[in-house]
Image (tube, grey):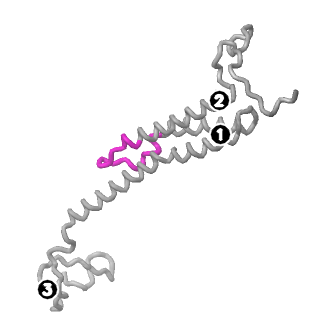
Amino acid sequence: MDKGKAIMGSGRRWAVEFTDNSTSNSSRDILDPPGFTRASHDPDDSSVSKQKKDAEANWKAQKAWDVAQAPFKNLCMMGFMMWMSGSTVHLFSIGITFSALWQPINALRGVGKAFEPYKDNRVDLLAPKLVFIALNLVGLGMGIWKLNTLGLLPTHVSDWVSSLPPAQEVEYSGGGIPLY
């Protein structure tokens, strides 16, 4: 079929075929531009695609580590908020403590979903997942420590049996200057 001519048998009146698989010069006797060869359009397609795949794998590994280290920022913020809420039982401290327990539990339940976009045969996700799990377990431990600080964990026998006397205070602190 002549290049640039309409295709009559295709059902369309004005269709043009732009593919030219010939290795010779143009059919209109126009020379190819200097440096142009019809044999290879892209320099070594396999190495370019391999480089792209390697770059994508490196990007996925870096993003997986970013996701794995994200709970550390949450730990710092939650620790500051728990320190600011004090050691007395009131609405704010209970809310902060509940949040400190709930966020790591939800994150641990969704480990697979958090790393789903970074699954690849070239990317090892075991180490980032373990770091993610470890940081969330530290956050869960901070929440349990705060519950203990508030006195909401049953840590003594008298917490379970009401007929037993409560534990004796080991330390008592008082401030000020004694006035005699």
Regarding mark 2 in the picture, which secondary structure is present there? helix
Q: Residues within 10 Å of mark 1 (few under 14, many from 20)?
A: many
Question: Which residue in the protein does label 1 denote?
Answer: 82
Name the residue located 26 percent from the left edge and 61 percent from the top edge.
51
Q: Residue 25 has which mark?
A: 3
Q: Position of residue 95 (x, y in %)?
A: 69, 38
Please give left or right for residue 64 compared with residue 79 in the image: left
* Three-letter residue code for mark 3: Asn
Q: Quadrant of residue 78?
A: top right
Regarding mark 1 in the picture, which secondary structure is present there? helix
Earlier-in-chain disc, 1 versus 3: 3
Name the residue located 51 percent from the left edge and 34 percent from the top edge.
137
* Three-letter residue code for mark 1: Met
Earlier-in-chain disc, 2 versus 1: 1
Span shown in magenta: 111-128
Q: Nearer the viewer, residue 173 or 94?
A: 173
Residue 119 magenta-highlighted:
yes
Q: Position of residue 109 (x, y in %)?
A: 51, 36
Q: Nearer the viewer, mark 3 or mark 2?
A: 2
Regarding mark 3 in the picture, which secondary structure is present there? loop
Question: Which residue in the protein does label 2 denote?
Answer: 147
Please give left or right for residue 117 compared with residue 52 in the image: right
Please give left or right for residue 37 compared with residue 143 in the image: left
